[in-house]
Amino acid sequence: MMRRVTAIDEAMSSRSARMETVRKRVSEFEGEEAVRQAAWEKLNERREAVAAERERVRRDLEDVVGRRASVEERRRISQQRLETIRTELAQLVLLPASADEVARLDAIEAAAGAAFSTVQSHVDALRGRQRELRLHVGTANEDLATAERHREETDERRRVAEDELRDLDIELAELRVRLEATQEALRRDADASE
């Protein structure tokens, strides 16, 4: 960044020297309009080039300032995190202070291991029961489905038998009516022949 600022200062000094040279040339060609016009055009071109260079340097400087601010913000956040970690590490007790605490921790570990083994055996037993119950439920569901199919088949046979019985009752009633009609006709025939 300082190199660019130095380069800009050098460019300004160089520009001043060139301006002086241009002024001398302009004064030499004061009488000739075409030459003066050409000198003005060169001077304007040079001014535009210098203005463009200034703008580029200004943009570069703004970019550098923005990057520097970003780096400083990241550094500040990293420092805060580092301080937080240091504080937490200072509060952390990694090893027990005495042999009694080590023995107590060993006893706790042994008890936890035994409890884990007991719990594991209970969990295994429960899973075994669960598998057995699932098999039993599956068998019971199959038996229930079979019984349901058998009930439906029996209901269908009962309905068919009831329909046939109704038809037979109707037929029987018709036969009784015919029998009575036949008996009545025979009586009349018998009465008529007497």
Image (cartoon, rainbow, N blue to C red):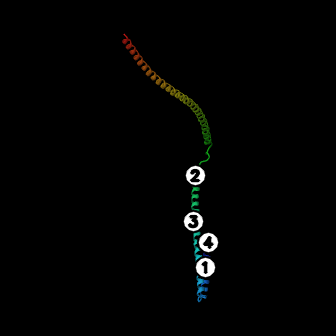
Checking the image for residue 66, the label placed there is 3
Q: Nearer the viewer, residue 117 or 67?
A: 67
Checking the image for residue 15, the label placed there is 1
- Disc 1 element: helix
Q: Quadrant of residue 122?
A: top right
Q: Earlier in the sequence, mark 1 or mark 3?
A: 1
Residue shown at 57% from the left, 52% from the top: 88
**Residue hosting label 2:** 88
Give the CA distance from mark 1 to mark 2. 60 Å
Quadrant the C terminus occupies: top left
In this view, the residue farthest toward the front is 193
Residue type of the residue flagged with mark 2: Glu
Give the CA distance from mark 1 to mark 4. 16 Å
Kindly check if marks 3 and 2 are in contact, taking CB atoms under 8 A apart as contact. Answer: no
Q: Earlier in the sequence, mark 4 or mark 3?
A: 4
Q: Is residue 152 left or right of residue 4?
A: left
**Residue hosting label 4:** 4
* Above or below: residue 171 compared with residue 12: above
Q: Position of residue 18 (x, y in %)?
A: 62, 81
Residue shown at 58% from the left, 74% from the top: 52
Q: Earlier in the sequence, mark 3 or mark 2?
A: 3
Give the CA distance from mark 4 to mark 3. 16 Å
Q: Position of residue 91 (x, y in %)?
A: 57, 50
Q: Is residue 190 left or right of residue 45?
A: left
Q: Nearer the viewer, residue 185 or 83?
A: 185
Q: Earlier in the sequence, mark 2 or mark 4?
A: 4
